Amino acid sequence: MKTNLLTVLLASGTLLASCQSNTSSTDSERTSATPNDSAATAPAVADTVAKVGNPKLLHTLDEAHNTPDGMALAPNGSIILSVPNLANNYYPAVLMEMTDTSIQPYLTTLPPEPTTKKAAPMDLAFGPDGNLYYAENQYENSKNFKSRLMRVVVENGKPGAVETVVDNFALANAVVWNGNKIYVTDSQWDMPNDNKGSAVLVFTLDELNKGVVHLKPKTMDPHVLATFTTKVNETGVDNGADGLDYDSRGDFYTGSFGDGTMYKMTLKPDGTLAKKEAMQLKGEKITCVDGLVIDRATDKIYVCNSRENAIQVINLKNNSVTTLAKNGDTNGANGLLDQPAEVLLNGKRLYVTNFDKPEKNFVNTKSDAPHTMSVIDLQ
């Protein structure tokens, strides 16, 4: 794995981003006066050896790219990475394009939400129309249903205009396409009688092409496929449905960020919900579900347990849970997991983003530099 110095220059007038291996950036845009600059207060590494597995360092990002999150495999084989910069939003959110040996800007002019004045891309996926869709999480900027589903119009492999296709989410999070339908999790879709609610919603491509879809917050909007309730524990987190994917049979799975419950959703032939069930898992406990991905060749779910700094695996053949990689508190400098948020499977390589923005009672105790991407080679 190459972890040498990679320097990328953003578009004219934007920040210089240095992507390097265990080396601090010293450009004039990054000073100790920068609000919430986690690089200035990085603690000593508390854990230097993986307890389980062998995650390796893929890329190191600077403070201008402080919370790497969603990933999407592009048609050309590269990976598009979202960087919402929620740990330090002094810096604007961006999309990056990366390979195993390089990382560079993909789109640095994301349109801010008009009232919050911020952009916050999370999970993302290419649609059957060749365009890139990303969920935007405005929840930390506004609790008043300001999150959106956005579309990046892609022409000849290059990103162009960015437009809103759905608005009025509370906390839009994961996105996944299956055929001509896009499924989106809202981790805070509260209802009048349930302030710990979340949901999976679904939209057709034809509908998105007809104009902006305006959701109806705190209702069973027609786009809601299923709803969930989070049981708040000692973390105090009530975020619910987070990661999302489907297996070889077309059944969908999501999990609760706040309490770690995994859910299975079986669909009818017409695409409506036939059954929702909390999964009865065996083996190791999952305490938190962030991003996840399903290998449809093996029907194994790779789950980011952000609370435990772990990647866990659910074998859908018997619902057993094992741990692929896990470590204690670390700043991620040597490739160890530092609050893993999203996973992307490409062949036998599992790509991991380290979000590094902890909640109470998480193993990860502080957002600190460096900001890293990890990779795990599967057998």
Image (tube, rainbow, N blue to C red):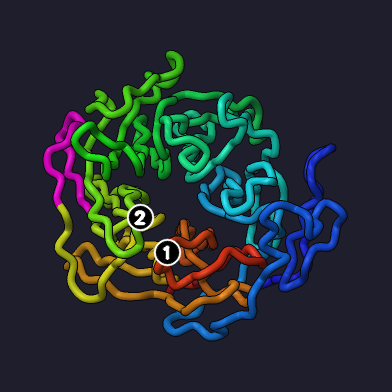
Where is residue 152? Give x, y as percent.
57, 31
- Looking at the rendered structure, the kind of residue marked 1 is Lys
Q: Quadrant of the N terminus?
A: bottom right
Q: Quadrant of residue 167?
A: top left
- Looking at the rendered structure, the kind of residue marked 2 is Val
Q: Closest to the observer: 114 or 9?
A: 114
Where is residue 215? Give x, y as percent.
35, 23
According to the image, label 2 marks what residue?
237
Where is residue 28? Give x, y as percent.
87, 54
According to the image, label 1 marks what residue?
360
Check contact, mark 1 vs mark 2: CB within 8 A. Answer: yes
Identify the magenta region: 263-277
Q: Quadrant of residue 192?
A: top left
- Residue 77 visible? The answer is no
Compute the Cα span from label 1 to label 2.
8 Å
Q: Name the residue rendered at 38%, 65% in the picture.
A: 305
